[in-house]
Image (cartoon, rainbow, N blue to C red):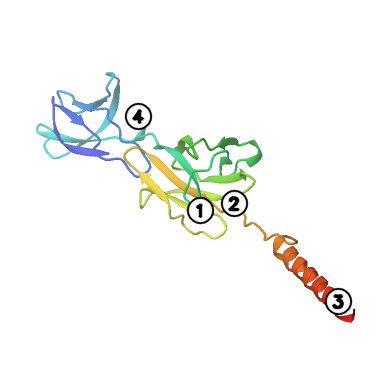
Amino acid sequence: FRAGPMFKGQTYELRELEAPAGYDKVDTVYKIEMSDDGLSANLIDGEGNKSPLKVELIEDVSKHNKVSGGIEIGIVNPRTKSTLEVIKEDKDSKKAIKDVSFKVFKKGENPDKAVEYTTDEQGKFTVPNLDTKETYFIREIKAPNDYILLDQDIVLSFDTKQNKWLVTEKDTGKELDEVKWDSQNNLLSVTVFNEQKKMLPQTGGSGIIIPLVISSLTGLGSLSYFIRFKR
């Protein structure tokens, strides 16, 4: 950073007003302390630790100078950590589906070693501490017997230009519709729908048996009539 002009022998406050996308704002109030002769300066953190700053002389040194500093002085913005909430619902009824198992893993990680999550009675599970610099995959590994298992992974990636998480299907690249991003609380909510298996129509049931019975009875009736007529 660069700041100035600053007067010799004065102390100034340094506050961060806004952080870049994907980073948390630093709330610590720093101080910049100019020496009495204006030839040196220190950055003082919230605990009183001092780091020297570079001083740039401008025109009349008896009036003011400029100071500058870089990452070496120790002001570090932590990367934003997000919480993922996955909600599992029936595609048609929108009812929650419990006991659906997933694995959530970073790009480059072995899915077989990833942590397994299972939806609760409300059809939900959460994953804490998602890093905005990472790409994550959600893979459904087990669903109730009457539901079709998802056939592709869901991809999570943070877009620093839009300052939000993008949630897409891995194979098609299509964005999911039911996604909510709460930037204030760093909460990403994703609703995933499962489709029920279709029941095949039964054969050999009453619909076939009844006509056969009727035909048989009709046949017997015809035969009985014929015999009586012959007598």
Mark 4 neighbour class, 10 Å CA radius: few under 14, some 14 to 19, many 20 or more? few
In this figure, which residue is indicated by the disc labeled 3? 228
Q: In percent of the image, x 13 and y 40: which residue is there?
A: 59
For residue 91, which numbered disc appears in the image?
1
Q: Residue furthest right?
A: 231
Q: Hey, what amino acid is under mark 1?
A: Lys
Distance of mark 3 from mark 2, alpha carbons? 68 Å
Question: Tag 2's secondary structure?
Answer: loop
In this figure, which residue is indicated by the disc labeled 2? 150
Q: Quadrant of residue 83?
A: top left
Please state which of the two labelled residues, at mark 1 or mark 4, is closer to the viewer. 1
For residue 74, which numbered disc appears in the image?
4
Direction from residue 150 to residue 19 in the image, left or right: left
Mark 3 neighbour class, 10 Å CA radius: few under 14, some 14 to 19, many 20 or more? few
Please state which of the two labelled residues, at mark 3 or mark 4, is closer to the viewer. 3
Distance of mark 3 from mark 1, alpha carbons? 64 Å
Mark 1 neighbour class, 10 Å CA radius: few under 14, some 14 to 19, many 20 or more? few
Distance of mark 3 from mark 4, alpha carbons? 113 Å
Q: Are marks 3 and 1 in contact (CB under 8 Å)?
A: no
For residue 178, which numbered disc appears in the image?
none
Q: Earlier in the sequence, mark 2 or mark 1?
A: 1
The relative height of residue 39 versus residue 49 in the rendered view (above or below) is below
